[in-house]
Amino acid sequence: MGLLEIAFSVMLEELLRRAGLMQNTGTETILFVDDNEDIAMVAKLLLQRFGYTVVTYLSGVEALKTFKLTPDKFDLVISDIGMPGMNGYELIAEIRRIRQNIPILLCSGSDEIDMVNNVKQCVAEGFLLKPFTMQELSRMTRSVLDNPFPRFSGTALNNKLLTEMA
């Protein structure tokens, strides 16, 4: 770990304490998949500060290879939807063929209604709208792990879903 990562890590821990987020912690192992290296790195650092073990991949294909080798190692999969090669929907379909009951949390920068319908159809337990805050990430991660039924994060998206589900 470089000096910049150490400094960031120390500041992050203090921010988490001040924000009262340390109650959303855990010890589970998370497979985090996003083709954006910066997002993957920051999410990994955040989730590690919450106590989770995090394995990150920048490719759905590479993440799937690891999942096939050790499917019981992971307690949760968090995946971006829009990735080149194998997108998040395809990755989840393959993961569900291997281990049907694993909780899945999808994330995307788009809140289009078609995407929302796709998330519901692939039976993801949660959705995070990018850019998500550390509060949203910590709460949604803990929530999906504790009680895996569909939930969504993001104001515009929640408004659409609440209207649609009523």
Image (tube, grey):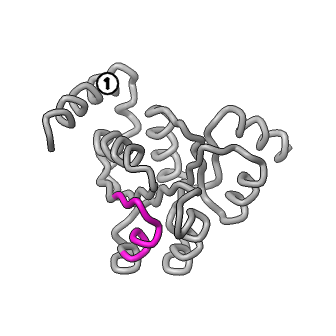
Based on the picture, tell me whether residue 84 belongs to the magenta stretch: no
Predominant secondary structure in magenta? helix
Callout 1 secondary element: helix
Q: In this image, 76 relative to 113: left or right?
A: left
Locate the C terminus by quadrant: top right
Residue positioned most to the front: 84
**Residue 160 drawn at (x, y percent):** 79, 40
Is 21 situated above or below 36?
Answer: above
What quarter of the picture does the N terminus occupy?
A: top left
Residue 128: give x, y in percent of width and height.
57, 44
Residue under the point 52% across and 51% down = 144
Residue lying farthest top? 18
Count how many numbered circles sit on residues in the image: 1
Residue at 62% of width from left, 55% of height from top? 149
- Which x, y percent locates residue 81? 58, 57
Residue type at tag 1 = Arg
Residues 73 and 155: in front is 155
Write the start and end of the magenta stretch as one range.
56-65
As for residue 62 lying within the magenta part, the answer is: yes
Q: Is residue 32 left or right of residue 27?
A: right
Q: Residue at x 78, y 48 (%)?
A: 113
What residue is disc 1 on?
A: 17
The crowd level at tag 1 (other Cα within 10 Å; few <14, some 14-19, many 20+) is few
- Horizontal relation, residue 105 to residue 111: left or right: left
Which of the 4 image quadrants contains residue 42? Answer: top left
